[in-house]
Image (spheres, rainbow, N blue to C red):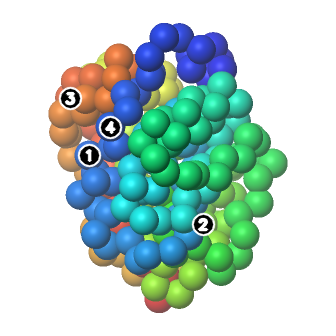
Amino acid sequence: MWNDRYSEDGFAFGTKANDFLIEAQPQIPQGRVLCLAEGEGRNAVFLAEQGYDVVAVDASAVGLEKAQKLAAERGVKIETIVTDLADFKIEEDAWQAIVSIFCHLPIALRQNIHRQVCKGLKQKGVLILEAYRPLQLKYKSGGPPVAELMMTLETLKEDFSTLETLHCCETVREVVEGKYHTGDGAVVQLIARKK
């Protein structure tokens, strides 16, 4: 599915980084940053432009090829890894930040990845996460078609209970990210730090 979507002309979700990530970026310590389910690279390239050493992971080779082209156009370098998150192991105690923007996974896989995120962050490392929540089904402006793939404050607090919460909220905000995320979106946002 994702290779097909990313094979379309242009960028499915645009080339500008996610607004919440842009706002949160000053809280990310310099160093290595892992971007999960990074797609066509808009967030990874933005972070590379801010001086971070960025690794972008996605199951779509087509998306990550576009990410590399976008990075080259903007004069930065990113590392890309084509793999399904079910097969990916997050290196422990290795990342100054991990970024999860609209990374919607089945519940068991989400819990597994989130456990790995907690172990993967270095001390004082920061998690930046934005995801759609079940209310998004009412808005139909993007995201998965089923509530089970979405997140809530409660699930995130449970998944990341070992991290210090710096920002956590559910809100409805205007999301303008290419043709597949446009309009009001019901999102949950989290910034958390490893103690």
Please say if 188 is above or below 163: above
Of residues 71 and 112, the one drawn nearer to the viewer in this rendering? 71
Tell me the distance, in whole angstroms, between the alpha carbons under discs 3 and 1: 13 Å
Q: Earlier in the sequence, mark 3 or mark 1?
A: 1
Callout 3, which amino acid?
Asp
- Residue drawn at the location 76% of the way across and 53% of the way down: 88
- Residue drawn at the location 44% of the way across and 22% of the way down: 11
The answer to whether marks 2 and 4 mark residues whose Cβ atoms lie closer than 8 Å is no
Q: Which residue is mark 2?
A: 117
Q: Residues within 10 Å of mark 4 (few under 14, many from 20)?
A: some
Q: Nearer the viewer, mark 2 or mark 4?
A: 4
Q: Nearer the viewer, mark 2 or mark 1?
A: 1
Q: Earlier in the sequence, mark 2 or mark 4?
A: 4
Residue lying furthest right: 87
Q: Which residue is mark 3?
A: 184
The answer to whether marks 3 and 2 mark residues whose Cβ atoms lie closer than 8 Å is no
Tell me the distance, in whole angstroms, between the alpha carbons under discs 3 and 2: 29 Å
Q: Nearer the viewer, mark 1 or mark 4?
A: 4
Tell me the distance, in whole angstroms, between the alpha carbons under discs 4 and 3: 17 Å
Q: Nearer the viewer, mark 3 or mark 1?
A: 1
Q: Earlier in the sequence, mark 4 or mark 3?
A: 4
Callout 2, which amino acid?
Val
Q: Which residue is mark 4?
A: 16
> Image check: 57 left or right of 69?
right
Image coordinates of residue 73 in percent, x first then y, are: 46, 36
Q: Which mark is residue 19?
A: 1
Please say if 162 is above or below 64: below
SS category of the residue bearing label 1: helix
